[in-house]
Image (cartoon, rainbow, N blue to C red):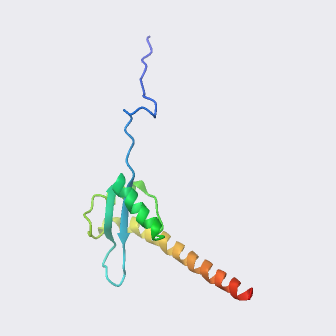
């Protein structure tokens, strides 16, 4: 029996299509919003800009490619549908925990500075 060879181009070959980076920006203001809202969504350079703005504003990032695929189907300013609440709640909880940790760190640093005076 003859062996069949599969020709797979090397990664640096321009024929290889690499998936573009994707990003979603969400907002959830419990005083204003009934549900989280999609503020921005994009791929490639638009995703890079979303990530740059998040970094500039010290907004935490949460990586979940499957959730990005689902949320990227929504329009800008659209509410997240109830079917995705549990997944988005995980993101919001992650951000909440980071905020709490940052507050605790800031209080500790302030206390250390006061104690060193």
Q: Quadrant of residue 49?
A: bottom left
- Measuring from the top left, give residue 11's x and y in whole percent: 46, 34
Left or right side of 101 for 22: left
Quadrant of the rendered structure where residue 16 is? top left
Q: Is residue 110 left or right of residue 46?
A: right
Closer to us: 65 or 77: 77
Point 57% across, 80% down: residue: 103
Q: How many marks?
A: 0
For the question of whether residue 90 can be seen, the reply is: no
**Residue located 45% across and 34% down the image:** 12
Q: Residue furthest right?
A: 116
Which is more toward the observer, 52 or 22?
Answer: 52
Residue appearing at x 34%, y 57% in the figure: 46
Q: Quadrant of the N terminus?
A: top left
Nearest to the observer: residue 112 or residue 100: 112
Kindly identify the residue that appears in the image at 47 percent across and 65 percent down.
55
Q: Looking at the image, can residue 11 be seen?
A: yes
**In the displayed structure, does residue 20 sit left or right of residue 95?**
left
Above or below, 64 against 111 in this view is: above
Residue 90 position, x and y percent, is: 45, 67
* Above or below 27: residue 117: below
Is 20 drawn above or below residue 56 in the view shown?
Answer: above
Q: Position of residue 58 (x, y in %)?
A: 48, 70
Picture quarter with the C terminus: bottom right
Q: Quadrant of residue 102?
A: bottom right
Residue 110 located left or right of residue 98? right
Residue 53 in picture, x, y percent from top left: 41, 66
Residue at the extreme top of the image, as rendered: 1
């Amino acid at each position: 029996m003859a062996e069949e060879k599969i020709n797979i181009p090397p990664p640096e070959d321009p024929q290889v299509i690499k998936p573009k980076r994707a990003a979603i920006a969400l907002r959830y203001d419990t005083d204003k919003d009934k549900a989280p809202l999609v503020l921005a969504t994009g791929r490639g350079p638009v995703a890079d800009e979303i990530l740059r703005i998040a970094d500039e504003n010290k907004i935490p990032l949460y990586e979940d490619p499957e959730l990005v695929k689902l949320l990227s189907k929504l329009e800008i300013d659209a509410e997240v549908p109830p079917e995705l609440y549990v997944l988005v709640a995980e993101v919001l909880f992650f951000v909440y925990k980071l905020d709490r940790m940052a507050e605790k760190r800031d209080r500790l640093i302030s206390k250390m500075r006061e104690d060193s005076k």
